[in-house]
Image: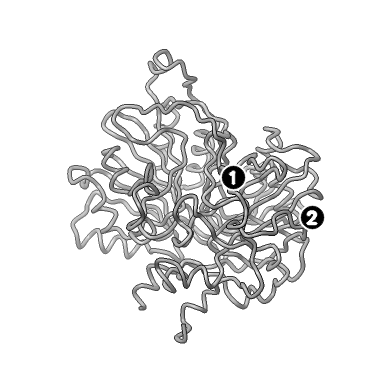
Amino acid sequence: MAGVKRGMRERRSDDEGEEREGRADYDEPVEKKKKTQSSPPSQPPIIIIGNSPLETHKLYFTKIEGLPARFNENAFNLDEILDSIKPVSSLHFNFMIDTRWVMSQYPSRCRNTPMTIVVGEKMGTGVREIRSEAESEGWTNINVQTASLPIPFGTHHSKLSIFEDDDMTIHILISTANLLPCDWKAKTQMFYYMKSAKVNRLDINGRRVEKEVPIVMDLIEYLGRYPIEGMTYWKDRLRESFFDFTVNRIVFSVPGYHKGEEMHKVGHKSVRNILRESRATDQNARKTLICQSSSIGSLGGTAGGWLGGEFTLSMRGGRDTTATQCWMIYPTKSDVMESVGGKLSGGSLPYSKGTAEKQEWLLKNMCRWRADNWGRSRIMPHVKSYLQADPNTRRFDWQIVTSANLSKAAWGTLQKNGGQLMIRSFEIGVLIMDPHCIRVPFDYPLARYKGGDRPWYIEDLDDDDQ
């Protein structure tokens, strides 16, 4: 049991905040309502470049063992991704890493290629552990680096991999999964994929291909926050490469006390800045904010503070939030107990009973985990997804898929009368504003908690009576 818990359990954040209270928009469970499409029905033509099954600027599910084949269509295991890329150089940022498993996922001829692994100095998989494994296995090609975490309770929670193939193409995966077999095979996870382009494809496909695409500049900015060996090479390669243009953007958090212009580049304030500039959300329209994560931080004893205040304001692009209803999707105890993995699936859902009891007001805004559309209702989520919906059209304005759980440690909290944003952890995700790229991992309309429902608590994992 101890070994299983070590692989399944993630550290929860201990920050505080509050959520706004709002009128319910969707009162019935999803089973009693006609399901709507979780992405717009009209899709652009599929363009597969070279031999890769992956399309650039797209969201994908990871493949789940045991699911009917139709639910694993266009979903991928890590070994399938690596086999299609055949990396000659790799860069991994993550929280937890099983190095032996990762190496086994590479094509055999790629296992001796240069690989840099970046982990935190606290929590998660440690530098010493990876270096010890590399030494014992003779993996001299692995370079392990440490990300500094200067603020207590912070984690290096980002999940990002960058690869270069022998054609000098750059491949980027922004994921919600730790580099663990249980994360990739037994949990609901997503990743965003993009790759560099050949300049001559501009004429062949008539598509906009250029340097300095905003999403790539975001990634270069993020890599610049790591003053460690090897980052210059990858930043230069990104600057030298051409990418298909997209309106989607990378949003990230880095630990620190951020002020001035810097404050608008990180955490929830970066989302506010991008949405304001893009006009991706209407000024006065009634909207629904849906938050779905695999952990919940301390949000305070009353509604209307951090979540309903600065966080929701950022998700509305700095616009009026009075017409915004907020919902939180988090598995109930019965969701976990009836899942494919049973009680052990709750090891990656570290919401504590003590935290929940201090924010009982959140319960009336909570919804169950339901993903019948994807065959994943009984596959517990590790994906984190935030969306803004129009309750009238039931369409989505934007989506964020990220490593960041709903917490102040991950997204930041304003201090000093709004003049400073304090962030504890490293996080990275994608803000998707292209409607054709939106892929909602849960069923919509939502299934609200009913009488007797309560969230899964991490303490339930140790309850021998269950």
Image coordinates of residue 245 in percent, x first then y, are 51, 26
> Which labelled disc corresponds to residue 36?
1
Which residue is at 39% across, 14% downward? 204
Viewer-proximal residue among 15 and 329:
329
Q: Quadrant of residue 127?
A: bottom left
Q: How far apart are marks 1 and 2 (CA)?
A: 42 Å
Image coordinates of residue 296 in percent, x first then y, are 60, 64
Image coordinates of residue 21 in percent, x first then y, are 77, 60
Q: Is residue 348 above or below residue 327?
A: below
Helix, strand or loop under label 2:
loop
Q: Nearer the viewer, mark 1 or mark 2?
A: 1
Q: Quadrant of residue 457?
A: bottom right
Q: Is residue 280 left or right of residue 428?
A: right
- Disc 2 crowd rating (10 Å Cα; few below 14, some 14-19, many 20+) is few
Which residue is at 65% across, 38% downward? 274
User: Which amino acid, by three-letter code, is at mark 2?
Assistant: Asn
* Disc 2: which residue: 417
Viewer-proximal residue among 65 and 419:
65
Give the colouring mode of the picture.
Answer: one colour
Which residue is at 33% across, 59% downward? 181
Among all residues in the image, which is located at the extreme bottom? 465
> Which labelled disc corresponds to residue 230?
none
Which residue is at 56% across, 58% downward? 293
- Disc 1 crowd rating (10 Å Cα; few below 14, some 14-19, many 20+) is few
Number of numbered discs: 2
Q: In which quarter of the image is residue 25?
A: bottom right
Upstream in sequence: badge 1 or badge 2:
1
Helix, strand or loop under label 1:
loop
Viewer-proximal residue among 110 and 117:
110
